[in-house]
């Protein structure tokens, strides 16, 4: 059972790392106005694919990173408390 939770934490960590990198790259693209990446706020209904991807990653990816980091921290804390209480 413990091995399953280790694999789940590892998978969550990898997904969070990838998502954090994508969000960071999108923030860099927005700040540099790369292919009008910041236009996802006001381009509807004629947004390019790039603008749609940046918009979805920005508005969905950022909250997922925050929730994932909190879940990861809570999981590590719970496992740490459980392992200390056994001894």
Image (spheres, helix red, strand yellow):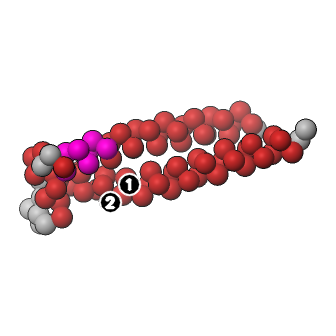
Q: Is residue 85 left or right of residue 28?
A: right
SS state under label 1: helix
Q: Is residue 43 left or right of residue 67?
A: left
SS state under label 2: helix
Q: Is residue 26 inside the magenta stretch? A: yes
Split into 4 quadrants, where in the image is the C terminus?
A: top right
Residue 23: image tag: none
Disc 1 target residue:
62
Please state which of residues 47 and 74 is positioned toward the viewer in this rendering.
74
Q: Is residue 62 inside the magenta stretch? A: no
> Which corner quadrant of the image does residue 45 belong to?
bottom left
Q: Residue at x 24, y 57 (%)?
A: 55
Split into 4 quadrants, where in the image is the N terminus?
A: top right
Where does residue 50 sit, x and y in percent of width and height?
17, 48
Disc 2 target residue:
59
Density class for disc 1 (Cα within 10 Å; few <14, some 14-19, many ≥20) is: some
Q: Are marks 2 and 1 in contact (CB under 8 Å)?
A: yes
Density class for disc 2 (Cα within 10 Å; few <14, some 14-19, many ≥20) is: few
Magenta-highlighted residues: 24-30
Where does residue 65 sit, x and y in percent of width and height?
44, 51
Image height of 10 relative to 73, above or below: above
Image height of 67 relative to 12, above or below: below
Inspect this view and state whether residue 49 appears. no
Q: Residue at x 87, y 45 (%)?
A: 85
């Amino acid at each position: 059972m413990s091995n399953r939770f280790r694999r789940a934490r590892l998978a969550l960590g990898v997904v969070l790392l990838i998502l954090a990198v994508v969000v960071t790259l999108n923030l860099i693209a927005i700040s540099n106005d790369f292919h009008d990446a910041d236009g996802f706020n006001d381009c509807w209904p004629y947004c390019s694919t790039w603008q749609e991807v940046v918009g979805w990653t920005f508005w969905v990816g950022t909250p997922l990173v925050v929730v994932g980091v909190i879940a990861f921290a809570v999981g590590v804390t719970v496992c740490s408390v459980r392992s200390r209480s056994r001894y």
